[in-house]
Image: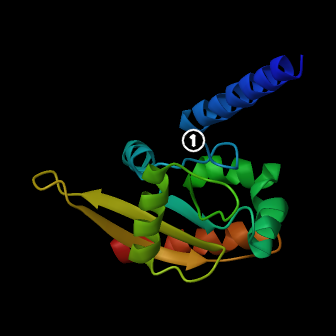
C-alpha cells in the first residue's frame, strides 16, 4: 500500500513538473496588459503607426520603485488611454525570482547595454530605423525618464520628450 502511494505521489509530482515546464515554454507575456516583450513586434507596430517605442526597463519582482511606478502610473486607466494614443509599450524585465525565456533575457540584456541602463526603473522613448539594404537597425533615442508619482507627471514628461524629438527630427 505504501509503495502504491509513493508511486502515485511520484507520478503526480512528475505530472505537475512537466505541466509547469510546458507552461514556461508557452508564449511569454509582459506583466502589464497591452505591453509587448519582443522588440521585433514593437518595431513592426512602430513602423505601422509612426508612434515611438516606450521601453520600461524593470525589475518587476524585486524593484520597489518599479512596483510603485506600475501601481501609480502603468496600472491606471488614464495612462492606458494615453499610451494607446501615443506610444508602443515594451517591457524589458530583469527579474530575480522568476525565469524568462532565454530569447527575451538575451534581448533585454542587449538593449540594457545599448541604452546603458544602470538603474531601475528606467524608461526610454525611442524610434528604430532599419536600413532596407543591410537590415541594420539604428536607434534614435529621444530621451529617458524614471519613476514619477502620478500619471500626469509621467505622461507630461514623456510628451515633452516626444515633442523635443519631433522638433529635432524636423
Q: x%, y% of residue 41? A: 43, 44
The colour scheme applied to this rendered structure is rainbow
- The mark tally for this picture is 1
Q: Which residue is mark 1?
A: 28
Q: Nearer the viewer, residue 163 or 33?
A: 33
Q: Is residue 161 above or below residue 2?
A: below
Q: Nearer the viewer, residue 6 or 85?
A: 6
Q: Is residue 166 above or below residue 79?
A: below
**Viewer can see residue 151:** no
Of the 4 image quadrants, the one containing the N terminus is top right
Q: How packed is label 1: few (under 14 Cα within 10 Å), some, or many (20 or more)?
A: some
Q: Residue at x 74, y 55 (%)?
A: 79
Q: x%, y% of residue 89? A: 57, 53
Q: Residue at x 59, y 74 (%)?
A: 160
Q: x%, y% of residue 21? A: 60, 36
**Is 140 left or right of 137, judged from the image as shown?**
right
Q: Secondary structure at mark 1?
A: loop
Q: x%, y% of residue 9? A: 81, 26
Of the 4 image quadrants, the one containing the C terminus is bottom left
Q: Residue at x 86, y 21 (%)?
A: 5
Where is residue 135, by image quadrant? bottom left
Name the outermost residue toward the left: 133
**Viewer can see residue 41:** yes
Q: Is residue 20 above or below residue 62?
A: above
Q: Residue at x 72, y 23 (%)?
A: 11
Q: Nearer the viewer, residue 16 or 159?
A: 16
Q: Is residue 118 above or below residue 95?
A: below
**Is 46 left or right of 89, judged from the image as shown?**
left
Amino acid at each position: 500500500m505504501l509503495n502504491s502511494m509513493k508511486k502515485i505521489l511520484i507520478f503526480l509530482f512528475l505530472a505537475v513538473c512537466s505541466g509547469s515546464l510546458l507552461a514556461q515554454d508557452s508564449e511569454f507575456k509582459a506583466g502589464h496588459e497591452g505591453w509587448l516583450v519582443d522588440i521585433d513586434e514593437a518595431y513592426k507596430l512602430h513602423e505601422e503607426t509612426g508612434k515611438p517605442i516606450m521601453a520600461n526597463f524593470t525589475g518587476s519582482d524585486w524593484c520597489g520603485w518599479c512596483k510603485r511606478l506600475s501601481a501609480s502610473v502603468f496600472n491606471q486607466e488614464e495612462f492606458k488611454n494615453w499610451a494607446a494614443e501615443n506610444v508602443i509599450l515594451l517591457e524589458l524585465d530583469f527579474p530575480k525570482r522568476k525565469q524568462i525565456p532565454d530569447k527575451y533575457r538575451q534581448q533585454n540584456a542587449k538593449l540594457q547595454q545599448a541604452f546603458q541602463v544602470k538603474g531601475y526603473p528606467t524608461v526610454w522613448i525611442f524610434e528604430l530605423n532599419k536600413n532596407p539594404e543591410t537590415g541594420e537597425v539604428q536607434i534614435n533615442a529621444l530621451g529617458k525618464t524614471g519613476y514619477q508619482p502620478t500619471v500626469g507627471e509621467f505622461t507630461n514628461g514623456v510628451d515633452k520628450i516626444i515633442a523635443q524629438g519631433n522638433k529635432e527630427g524636423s
